[in-house]
Amino acid sequence: MSTSSLWQHLGFRRLYLSSISFALGTQIYQLALPLIFYELTRSPTVMTGLRAVELLPNLLLAMFIGVWVDRVDRGRWARRAMSGMVVLMGLQALLLPQGAAMLPLFFVSAFALMSLNYLYAICRMGLVKEMLPEPLLLPATGQLTVISQVAAVLGPALAGALVAWQMALGLWLPMAALLLAAALLRGIDLPARPFVSAGYWQDWREGWRVLRANRPLWQLSWWVVLINGSAGVVEVLFLFRARDELQIPPATLGLLYGLAGLGGICGGLLCSRLRGRLGLGRLLMSALALEAASILMLAWGEALALLVCGMALNSFAMVLGNVCVWGYRQESTASAHIGRVSGLTGSLFKLLMPLALLASGQLASHQALGALLAGCAGLHLLACLGLRCSAIYRVP
């Protein structure tokens, strides 16, 4: 089946347009909020604490959200999740004039907002699985990831400019984008999905059984735990290094992130072709090796040109790895179980990140940021060697 068949599918085209608006709004928000916190507190501990709180819903709730998604109308709940995110962003915008005094409420609202964000993400995975045949799942995952990377080009540049101009705009504009995304998602026709349930907790246990039976995905999930923990630390520490050590202003930093997103676009477009040539396991190993090299560039680079190259290479490698992991999860899981398997693996994927972020925030006050980032590169190389010995290496 040719990839051109993907664009002949009306439901996917509507989902694609909705995803464009959603990705742009969330990309603006995800850079704007840490920048806002930095301007309010000038504290790396607060920044890493915020990121850790945002990851907790994924870690604590994703496995339960996944069971829910397999039991409901995924399109309707995707729209409800986006609407809830809009309400919470509006609350955060109203709290901004109170400054750092409202930090506890910011943390609570960030936790709730990311819970809804993950509900939407699992619903969208289920929608893709429902509407498309298996040969189109990896191309569809790649195209949707390209959207995120295009938004990564535009969103950070807009976020930096908005925060530099007026902090609240970094929240109001994402609200408008998410409202548009919810509207575009209305009216998607899906094939009838039979639903047979023996009870919530029995469905939850069934999800674990299906995941454990998929040996390549089960082994891969534990290596992704290490990779994501390292990558999350890199994201926050580099942002702090850029603002604190290198004194890069918000608008320039947003432009750098935007230019770096071009690497991710290339990764999303080339992933299907590269997998056909290398196989899934070898492509994942190559992506991790490239990501380790890019982290070293971010750890020691000072010239803007070198930082842009490092960020672009990092984005390219991360997208290659993400599309491979997400695409294989879609291919190897039945539609009836995709919500549960996505939720369970999502929780596992983020298992190390909150602890790693909190620890790195403390270490950043006492250790050189370059040395900490170089340590993260070493963890990526360790994961690369681990994949060579795992079942995923033999997946074509």
Image (cartoon, grey):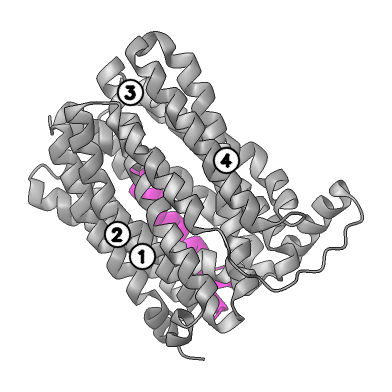
Give the mark toward the camera: 3 or 4: 4
Which residue was labeled with disc 4? 116
Which one is earlier in the sequence, the residue at label 2 or at label 4?
Answer: 4
Q: CA separation, marks 3 and 1?
A: 28 Å
User: Image quarter for residue 61?
Assistant: top right
Q: Amino acid at mark 1?
A: Val
Q: Is residue 102 above or below residue 200?
A: above
Q: Amino acid at mark 2?
A: Val
Which one is earlier in the sequence, the residue at label 3 or at label 1?
Answer: 3
Q: Is residue 338 left or right of residue 21?
A: right
Q: Main secondary structure of the magenta part?
A: helix
Which one is earlier in the sequence, the residue at label 4 or at label 1?
Answer: 4
Q: Amino acid at mark 4?
A: Leu
Mark 3 and mark 2 in contact (Cβ < 8 Å)?
no
Q: Residue furthest bottom?
A: 1
Q: Is residue 16 magenta?
A: no
Q: Residues within 10 Å of mark 1 (few under 14, many from 20)?
A: many
Mark 2 and mark 1 in contact (Cβ < 8 Å)?
yes
The disc placed on residue 37 is 3
Q: CA separation, marks 3 and 4?
A: 21 Å
Mark 4 and mark 2 in contact (Cβ < 8 Å)?
no
Q: CA separation, marks 2 and 4?
A: 23 Å
Q: How many marks?
A: 4
Q: Is residue 137 left or right of residue 204?
A: left
Q: Is residue 29 above or below residue 333?
A: above
Image position, residue 4 (x, y; %): 42, 86
Q: Which residues are magenta?
A: 375-396
Which residue was labeled with disc 2? 150
Frontmost residue, 34 versus 170: 170
Residue shown at 57% from the left, 40% from the top: 116
Q: Residues within 10 Å of mark 2 (few under 14, many from 20)?
A: many
Q: Element at badge 4?
A: helix
